[in-house]
Amino acid sequence: MEHSPRPHYHVAVKPNSFALPSHRGNRESPARDRLIQAVRSLLEKHHPSQLTTSMILKEAGVARNTLYLHFEDLSNLLETVLLSIFSKSVEENVQAAQTLVDGSKTKAELLGRMHELIADAQSDARQVNRFARCRLVAYSEANPRLAKLLAAEQTRLTAQFQKVFETIKEKGWLREHVDPAAAGVLVQAMTLGKVIDDVSDKHLPRSVWNKMFSDVILRSLIKD
Amino acid sequence: MTAGPHQNFVQGTRNRRLRGSAVKQALLAAAERLLQTHTPNDITTTMILREAGVARGSLYHHFDSQAELLESAMLLMFSHHVTDNIQMLDSVVNQSRNRHEFLAGLKQVTQISQGKDRRASRFARIRLIAAAEHNPRLEQLLSKEQTRLTRALTKIIESAKTNNWIQKDIPSAALAVFIQSYTLGKVVDDLVAKPIDPLDWNDLIGMFVERTLTKSR
């Protein structure tokens, strides 16, 4: 057990007197995109709390003033990127589910192809996304600006999941008394909750977890 | 935190006194109480000392820093909540005389453990996971605690299986993790302005229990 640095419960921010929220620049600017892209690639190798303004500016090839034209502060830039990483990955899953449901002519077809979708959404590669989502929830507690962004994003995503289950209902495959919105929350809860396994000493075999996940959908949500 | 032989490892210069462990408990309990109503960032050392009725110097006898105290308190809070849930489940398994009673008991546990007033506990667990990501000491403590809890839950599931109340082909350890997963994951619904109806959620979990877990369909 070595002595470790004191924890940061939110992204470290240096107060910045230049930040004037009302002076934020055009959302579609190439400099803004370059900053976002720079943070994305830095986050592949570093924890958010390790990123400094200089690192990001160097990676993006952008001047310091430009950063503050587009973002209130470093923290705001990091939040924006973390949120977009999180919502992009969830959105990919929900869109794949919607496409699958829309394209299935029979219930058997839906169930047959559902396994691939689950295997992808629950893969080890998504561990990063699970931690990113936890981090966002944790940061948002002490950061009303982020909490508001996250609430809006989460509402949007839950609505998309709800639509998937509504489509299943329209096709007559949803079990009676299953509320589509609650079902949408359940699949997201199960997906995020796998983080429990990530933090444990011993990990469950992937196939065991995926079987559990598909059994719940198959037996509890979908009609026999 | 248990005091082990390697305790002094954490920082060689600072000796933790074994006596005065009551003071340590008071500090932890005070921090845990404050965490029910405040986020860790809002909690100051002064607040903890006042709540505990303890002098400033005592804090540093027992903890390297205020951050370490808060970490330990968060971990304690997390353990308490999960242990509560596990004890409820344990008594359901032990006191049920038949499958019907077992299902009714599970329904009650669901209502309590998934409820709105557990919101703070869901956030606390998420906070710990996020904080542990870049804090090896906390990561180790969390992983140890998580493993202990999963093992306890696995044991309860095993004993429900001997009564034929849970299908034997479901792996116990996987189920233990799974139950904790959706319990924690419900935090996604805590974030939004318009959460789902708690009754709809309970129905859904009830459906899972009835259709996936228990025998005789």
Image (cartoon, coloured by chain):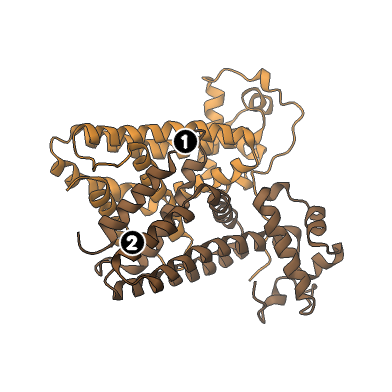
Q: Which chain is brown?
A: B
Quarter of the N terminus of chain A within the rendering: bottom right
What whole-number distance in Å separates the C-alpha atoms at marks 2 and 1? Answer: 32 Å
**Chain of the residue under the numbered disc 1 shown in the image:** A
Q: Nearer the viewer, residue A15 or A68?
A: A15
Looking at numbered disc 1 in the image, what kind of residue is underneath it?
A: Gln
B81 with respect to B215 (left or right):
right
Q: Nearer the viewer, residue A59 or B18?
A: B18
Regarding residue B189, the answer to whether it shows in the image is yes
Q: Residue at x 65, y 49 (%)?
A: A9
Q: Colour of chain A?
A: orange
Looking at numbered disc 2 in the image, what kind of residue is underneath it?
A: Leu
Q: Nearer the viewer, mark 2 or mark 1?
A: 2
Instruction: Read off the residue under disc 2.
Output: B103
Q: Which type of secondary structure does the marked residue at label 1 adopt?
A: helix
- Is the same chain shared between marks 2 and 1? no
- Indicate the quadrant where residue B22 lies: bottom right
